[in-house]
Amino acid sequence: MPRQLTIAREQPDTAAAVTNEQSDWLRTYLETERKNLHSALGELLAIERQKFERKTNEFELKIAKLNGAVDILRGAQPPSPTKFPTIKAWSDAIHYQGEVVTHNGSTYQAQRDTAHAPPSPEWTCLAAAGAGFRICGTYDVHKKYQKLDVVIVNGSSFAALNDNPGPCPGDDWRLLSGRGSRGGKGEIGERGPRGEKGENGAPGADALTITSWMLDRARYRAIPMMSNGKPGPELELRGLFEQFFSKTASSNKG
């Protein structure tokens, strides 16, 4: 009997020890999971806050742009003027990003600072050189002309539509500009006596000259670039090309 009682007293102590170990393990596991969850939530909140700040900045930027557009529409703020870049001839020097130059009949814009001549990777071609008019002066009946040669006849200018165009004016020539006419006395009245000669005026500015040509291929126009860096009057070429292709098509059919 005494031995049985001793065994009975030892069983509750063993069960209590197992229960304590399980409790400690569970407490440690829950604490670890709590820390992991806390860390994951912190990372998630940081990511969401960055997204929110980015969206907020984008929204503020759109509001700023919208306010600027509203000011322009209201007349409170004038729109930014559009400036045509100054075009100059390429030279053996350093050209900086954004500069526009002409070289061998083509127009280029520098993509970065460069001392290389176009065409090269540092340049973007804005307008490539193409077939242009060749000014040949006063028409000479004994001279052979080629396509796009320009001659002067009695003050009017004509362009050849093809090689060996024949007598000018004629079917193979296109009138570019006609000679102006002056009105008779009946239109402007009788002239009065000449007045006294006045004092000489101040010297005038140098006459503008054409430095290069820009081709507007979409509208079939040639735009001269003047020596003051500004574009000159546009030259309409659509009719010339239409007549040229019409005659070419007729010749091929024949």
Image (cartoon, rainbow, N blue to C red):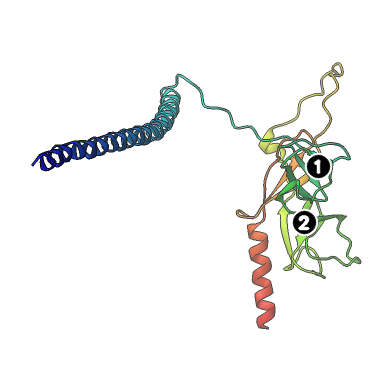
Label 1: which secondary element: strand
Label 2: which secondary element: loop
In the rendered image, the residue lying farthest to the bottom is: 254
Viewer-closest of 218 and 203: 218
> Which amino acid type is marked by label 1?
Thr
The percent position of residue 215, horizontal first and vertical second, equals 69, 51
In the rendered image, the residue lying farthest to the left is: 1
Q: Is residue 177 left or right of residue 31?
A: right
Indicate whether 121 appears above or below 190. Answer: below
The residue that appears at 21% across and 39% down in the rendered structure is 14
Viewer-closest of 38 and 114: 38
Quadrant assignment for the N terminus: top left
Q: Quadrant of residue 45?
A: top left
Q: Quadrant of residue 17?
A: top left
The percent position of residue 175, horizontal first and vertical second, equals 72, 57
The residue that appears at 18% across and 40% down in the rendered structure is 15
Mark 1, Cα crowd under 10 Å, few <14 / some 14-19 / many 20+, is some
> Which amino acid type is marked by label 2?
Gly
Indicate whether 209 appears above or below 133. Answer: above
The residue that appears at 44% across and 25% down in the rendered structure is 64
The percent position of residue 58, horizontal first and vertical second, equals 43, 32
Q: Which residue is mark 2?
A: 132
Q: Which mark is residue 137?
A: none
